[in-house]
Amino acid sequence: MNMQDFRLDGKVALVTGASYGIGFAIASGFAAAGATIVFNDIKQELVDKGLAAYKEAGIEAHGYVCDVTNEEQVNNLVATIEKEVGVIDILVNNAGIIKRIPMCDMSADEFRQVIDVDLNAPFIVSKAVIPSMIKKGHGKIINICSMMSELGRETVSAYAAAKGGLKMLTRNICSEYGEQNIQCNGIGPGYIATPQTAPLREKQADGSRHPFDQFIIAKTPAARWGTPEDLMGPAIFLASDASNFVNGHVLYVDGGILAYIGKQP
Ligand code: NAP
Ligand code: GCO
């Protein structure tokens, strides 16, 4: 076993929607392992914020504005990265949104928006990077899935449909391109403290914990929310040569939620 296999030196990694949150942490972990970091976000203002945050962390990242649901923008992004930075060795489909609305109150348009960002976009971005990965002879794609790739919950019908679909897209990319030495795996984060989940952790007027916050602590054997940094090690593993025979797998990083039936009465 060569510990160098866990390193990412000389690799170019694109992490989508990585100005902050989970994407930022994963990209920072990749940088610590030696990779060159490229990220995009949907607005210039966010890209600027991201660039400043990477700089503060001592990382020289390349940031671009790109809406991952727009195929033309994505193709231009990938062509620009290849010209300005190099061929993408590692793609992390991280950009995502959630709408917490009971299904019968949700419009078809709102449902489609979630599917568009959380499922169609990983298809579009993966499709844009795979041809160059094939030419280069290797590639790593990591799709950021969810507990909702396995479980349902009130109010998240579109998100669960998209993340369940993303798990199957992961297996399909593995099936189609495994022979070309492309490994496509997923990471299924548990409940992670980021802006996306901030409304679920808001303190009550009397200063007590939000009931959802209490529910998650009780459902998680680790008895805490995850942090974006909890995802760094698993992401580095799946991006590195140490995982070259791991393909089509979803690695759940959830403090044990999926293993646990819940506290006995
Ligand atoms: P976040 O804090 O909301 O960050 C997501 C990023 O994606 C934001 O910068 C967002 O920009 C960007 N984005 C959204 N739509 C985009 C588009 N069309 N094109 C480009 N960028 C876009 O979310 P997070 O909590 O870090 O989550 C990251 C990923 O992990 C998501 O796929 C999420 O579903 C998944 N996840 C999160 C958790 C959790 O507990 N937090 C758990 C499991 C899975 P804006 O700020 O403009 O929206
Ligand atoms: C929710 C949460 C989840 C998490 C995460 C769980 O409303 O239930 O936001 O969807 O963000 O995806 O893995």
Image (tube, rainbow, N blue to C red):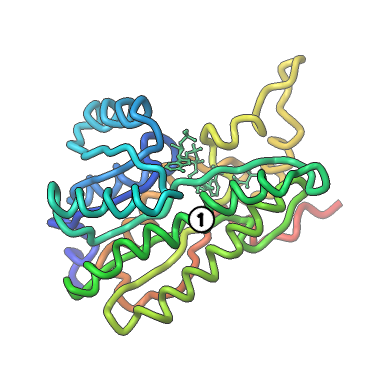
Label 1 amino acid?
A: Val
Horizontal side of residue 25 vs 257, given as left or right: left
Between 222 and 186, which is closer to the camera in this rendering?
A: 186
Reply above or below: 41 against 164. Answer: above
User: Can you tell me whether the CB of the residue at mark 1 lies under 8 Å from the nearest atom of ligand 1?
Assistant: no
Q: Residue at x 17, y 36 (%)?
A: 60
Quarter of the image where one finds residue 79:
bottom left
Horizontal side of residue 239 vs 68, given as left or right: left
Crowd band around label 1 with a 10 angstrom C-alpha radius: few (<14), some (14–19), many (20+): many
Q: Residue at x 36, y 35 (%)?
A: 19
Quarter of the image where one finds residue 126:
bottom left
Horizontal side of residue 248 vs 133, given as left or right: right
Q: Residue at x 22, y 29 (%)?
A: 55
Instruction: Determine the secondary structure under disc 1.
Output: strand
Quarter of the image where one finds residue 82:
bottom left
Residue beneath label 1, please? 253
Between 263 and 207, which is closer to the camera in this rendering?
A: 207
Residue 199 position within the rendered picture, expressed as x and y whole percent measured from the top left: 65, 30
Residue 36 position within the rendered picture, expressed as x and y whole percent measured from the top left: 18, 48
Furthest-front residue in this view: 72
Between 71 and 121, which is closer to the camera in this rendering?
A: 71
